[in-house]
Image: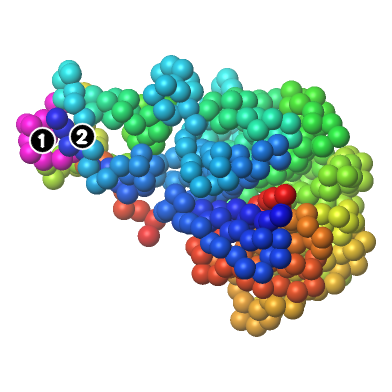
């Protein structure tokens, strides 16, 4: 089970609390987390990554174990602490715009 | 007993104000979608409890919300697992331009790709609560025939020969006005900042620029076919060939469905402004809120004044009773004025300072029905019977 922390705006959209949990069948990657997240909460499609291209939206960031992994490949394996659920995977809105 | 429902979109959420027909005591419900920009909400003329809302964010993109109970509960249509038709279909926030989007004029005169940013205006169709139009930035018209679950572009507009000459106004290249002719729903008028006004007579397949008579000194050819910064167009449902326009500068009028416009700014203290609307029972009574200039987006002299013309323009009277007459520097945005259809007609407008003012007597006197909301982006009024 992977723990995912969503930004405030997406929590209200998906009507969930601080943290959601996803179970992955295949390799634990950012892409796999987002695929599962969007399956579980379809209203999040298009809000974290763009429709069709599946590119991360420019003002969205991904953090794992304190590191900004937004620019790493979405197919790269995630740290063990994320995979085991010891640490949450953070999806954040960039601090921009005041 | 009849009542009034005021749908208020703000920078940080949606609010719904309700009153009985006396229009004296108001209940404020909200914020809905707290923290999100709500560009516009509008109810269906077929089913007033069916309300559509445009929820948007520079971070997380576009969301379409829908209510079927007058705004108590909301859903994102097409986003339940059962509602999905496939990986690329059935998603209420998926606005994809038809074909290769092409380019339009950028601020610096170069060509720039069309990029979807947000929905500015939602216009439910006249005959079917599941049919709704969306005016978007970068300018295009979309429609949904399944209650907002999926959207298709009416691409004849964006693909008009003049498209490469359209350019954004200061607020972006937005399609902000959608007016459907009640006598002929295939005739639709739209406004784009800064391209101008367009009309279709075939339900959106083909479009004609209707900007003859507009004069915009700030563009290279002041009488150009397109390029005019139209801020808002209004129509009375019983006289759909008569259109009133608040342009960037100038208040204009057409009596032939937009084929020709003439200026009716008359004695206004400034003919710059954003909203314009028509009295519910008097097709020649119109309202504007003069703003000082395009550089100073606040009322002249710090006095918030609505101006009313009972002659369809040219002769204007200032309406000030109940409105702040000193030190007022708010703006009233283009979609932030609306009317009810009670008698006497009620007029409503919202400000960037977070007040919504209402008049129960066709504009003679005003009072705030809510204040200190986030900046108001849009106001729509429903008269419930």
Asked if residue B356 is positioned above or below residue A97 in the image, the reply reads below
Look at mark 1 in the image and give the residue it sits on. Answer: A85
Residue A59 appears in the rendering: no
Numbered badge on residue B24: none
The magenta segment? A76-89
Residue drawn 71% across the image and 40% down it: B45
Residue A33 spot, x, y in % from top left: 23, 28
Residue drawn 63% across the image and 71% down it: B368
Classify 10 Å Cα crowding around label 1: few (below 14), some (14-19), many (20 and above). Answer: some
Residue drawn 36% across the image and 46% down it: A12
Residue A17 spot, x, y in % from top left: 27, 45
Residues at marks 2 and 1, common chain?
Answer: yes
Residue A33 appears in the rendering: yes
Marks 2,1: beta carbons within 8 A = yes
Residue drawn 44% across the image and 46% down it: B57
Look at mark 2 in the image and give the residue it sits on. Answer: A21
Asked if residue B351 is positioned above or below residue B119 in the image, the reply reads below
Q: Chain of mark 2?
A: A
* Residue farthest to the bottom, as pictured: B326
**Whole-Å distance between the Cαs marked 2 and 1?**
9 Å
Asked if the stretch drawn in magenta spans residue A83, the answer is: yes
Residue B370 spot, x, y in % from top left: 57, 68
Question: Which of the 4 quarters of the picture holds residue B196?
Answer: top right
Quadrant for the N terminus of chain B in the image? bottom right
* Residue farthest to the front, as pictured: B1
Q: Nearer the viewer, residue B226 or B32?
A: B32
| Left or right side of B177 for B327 | left
């Amino acid at each position: 089970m992977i723990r995912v922390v969503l930004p405030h705006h997406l929590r209200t959209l998906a009507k969930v609390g601080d943290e959601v949990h996803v179970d992955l069948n295949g390799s634990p990657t950012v892409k796999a987390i987002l695929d599962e997240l969007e399956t579980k909460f379809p209203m999040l499609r298009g809000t974290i990554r763009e429709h069709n291209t599946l590119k991360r939206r420019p003002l969205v960031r991904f953090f794992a174990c304190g590191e900004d992994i937004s620019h790493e490949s979405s197919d790269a394996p995630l740290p063990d602490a994320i995979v085991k659920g010891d640490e949450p995977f953070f999806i954040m809105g960039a601090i921009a715009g005041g | 007993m009849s009542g009034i429902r005021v749908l208020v979109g703000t920078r940080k959420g949606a609010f719904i104000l309700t009153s009985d027909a006396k229009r004296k005591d108001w209940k404020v419900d909200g914020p809905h979608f707290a923290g999100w920009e709500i560009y516009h909400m509008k109810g269906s003329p077929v089913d007033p409890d069916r309300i559509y809302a445009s929820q948007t964010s520079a971070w997380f993109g576009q969301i379409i919300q829908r209510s079927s109970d007058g705004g108590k509960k909301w859903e994102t249509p097409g986003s339940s697992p059962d509602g999905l038709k496939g990986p690329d279909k059935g998603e209420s926030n998926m606005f994809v331009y038809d074909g290769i989007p092409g380019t339009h004029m950028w601020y610096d005169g170069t060509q720039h790709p069309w990029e979807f940013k947000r929905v500015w205006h939602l216009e439910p169709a006249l005959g079917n609560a599941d049919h709704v139009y969306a005016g978007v930035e970068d300018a295009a018209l979309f429609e949904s025939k399944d209650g907002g679950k999926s959207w298709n572009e009416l691409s004849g507009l964006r693909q008009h020969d003049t498209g490469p000459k359209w350019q954004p106004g200061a607020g972006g290249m937005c399609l902000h006005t959608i007016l459907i002719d009640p006598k002929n729903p295939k005739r639709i008028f739209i406004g784009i900042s800064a391209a101008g006004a367009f009309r279709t007579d075939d339900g959106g397949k083909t479009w004609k620029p209707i900007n003859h008579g507009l004069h915009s000194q700030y563009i290279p050819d002041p009488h150009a076919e397109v390029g005019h910064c139209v801020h808002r167009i209004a129509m009375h449902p019983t006289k759909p060939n008569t259109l009133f326009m608040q342009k960037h500068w100038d208040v204009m009028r057409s009596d032939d469905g937009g084929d020709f416009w003439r200026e009716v700014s008359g004695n206004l203290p400034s003919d710059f402004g954003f909203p314009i609307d028509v009295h519910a029972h008097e097709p020649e009574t119109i309202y504007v809120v003069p703003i000082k200039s395009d550089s100073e987006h606040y009322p002249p002299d710090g006095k918030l004044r609505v101006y009313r013309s009972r002659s369809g323009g040219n002769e204007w009277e200032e309406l000030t009773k109940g409105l702040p007459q000193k030190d007022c520097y708010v703006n009233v945005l283009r979609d932030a004025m609306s009317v009810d259809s009670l008698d006497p007609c009620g007029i409503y407008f919202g400000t960037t300072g977070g007040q919504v003012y209402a008049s129960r007597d066709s504009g003679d006197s005003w009072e705030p029905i809510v204040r200190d909301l986030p900046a108001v982006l849009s106001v729509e009024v429903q008269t419930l019977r």
